[in-house]
């Protein structure tokens, strides 16, 4: 069977671990291709595979993948999330770092999931948050505990409709009902005030000291203004 025929078939179930490659690692031919045909997921090849695999599955089927978790949160994957949130996330193991014995460090953060192309309204997906468990063995044990229906505080259930209520539609399955309610009835902070940087020294090693490192009588604790600080003749002022 040639590759073309395989790609045209529709499957009941599709499972894969796709390749990971950020757009900066793509050559011009690949980059131009994904920009043209997969603009919603062009930031990384695993996102392209997510879109492609969904098209290879029947509407009544399922596809399951393990990918980096960047698509769940980053703004560069917002359009992909919009498409995912019109489907149904059946369940997810949010693995985080150190999910594989062979891969150490904090760089590769993964998530494994099952998605149906169909939009099952008000379906409550199951999300297992394993990001705080430090190694692959512990993550495995904690997953088995969920499957065996032990009482756990890292299993979350929620509908994807909640994600669409938050700007950017992040897959924030652990967010409380109260916070979601705030997004629904409240205003975004940037609609009320103009965000600005707060106090910053620009050179902490030069300008900051712990309070016990300086002479107490050279500290002005109650300056109300710059002139007040200058007139005091003091050298140090509370910063945080």
Image: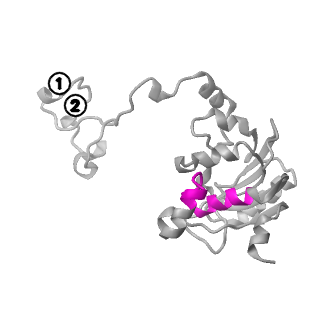
Q: Is residue 169 above or below residue 51?
A: above
Residue beneath the point at 78% across and 58% down? 63
Give the class, few, some or many, for how many residues have Cα within 10 Å of label 2's Cα (few <14, many ≥20).
some
Give the class, few, some or many, for how many residues have Cα within 10 Å of label 1's Cα (few <14, many ≥20).
few
Q: Is residue 136 above or below residue 130?
A: below
2 or 1: mark nearer the eye = 1
Pointer 2 and pointer 1: residues touching (CB < 8 Å)? yes
Q: Is residue 184 visible?
A: yes
Residue beneath the point at 82% across and 47% down? 151
Q: In the image, residue 20 lies at what x, y percent?
A: 60, 66
Query: For the view shown, which residue lies furthest in the bottom direction?
Result: 1
Q: Main secondary structure of the magenta part?
A: helix
Toward which corner of the image does residue 236 lie, by quadrant?
top left
Q: In the image, residue 172 lies at what x, y percent?
A: 64, 42
For the residue pair 10 and 160, the one nearer the viewer reads as 10
Q: Can residue 36 be found in the magenta stretch?
A: yes
Q: Can residue 196 be found in the magenta stretch?
A: no
Residue beneath the point at 60% across and 60% down? 109
Toward which corner of the image does residue 18 lie, by quadrant?
bottom right
Q: Which mark is residue 220?
A: 2
The span shown in magenta is 34-54
Q: Is residue 75 above or below residue 199?
A: below
Q: In the rendered view, does 144 fall on the left or right side of 164?
A: right
Q: In the rendered view, does 228 fall on the left or right side of 50?
A: left
Q: In the image, residue 45 lies at what x, y percent?
A: 59, 63
Q: Which mark is residue 228?
A: 1
């Amino acid at each position: 069977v040639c590759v073309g025929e395989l790609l045209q078939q529709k499957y009941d179930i599709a499972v894969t671990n796709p390749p990971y490659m950020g757009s900066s690692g793509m050559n011009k031919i690949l980059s131009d291709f994904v920009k043209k045909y997969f603009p919603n997921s062009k930031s990384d090849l695993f996102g392209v595979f997510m879109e492609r695999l969904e098209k290879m599955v029947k509407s009544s089927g399922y596809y399951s993948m393990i990918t980096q978790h960047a698509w769940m949160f980053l703004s560069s994957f917002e359009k992909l999330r919009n498409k995912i949130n019109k489907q149904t996330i059946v369940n997810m193991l949010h693995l985080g770092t150190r999910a594989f014995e062979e891969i150490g460090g904090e760089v590769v953060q993964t998530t494994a999931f099952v998605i149906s192309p169909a939009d099952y309204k008000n379906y409550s997906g199951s999300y297992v948050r394993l990001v705080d468990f430090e190694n692959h063995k512990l993550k495995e044990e904690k997953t088995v505990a969920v499957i065996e229906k032990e009482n756990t505080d890292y299993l979350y259930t929620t509908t994807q409709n909640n994600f669409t209520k938050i700007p950017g539609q992040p897959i924030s399955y652990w967010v409380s009902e109260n916070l979601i309610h705030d997004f629904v009835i409240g205003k975004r902070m940037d609609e009320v005030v103009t965000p600005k940087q707060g106090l910053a020294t620009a050179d902490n090693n030069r300008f900051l000291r712990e309070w016990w490192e300086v002479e107490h009588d050279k500290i002005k604790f109650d300056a109300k203004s710059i002139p007040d600080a200058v007139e005091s003749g003091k050298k140090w002022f509370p910063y945080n």
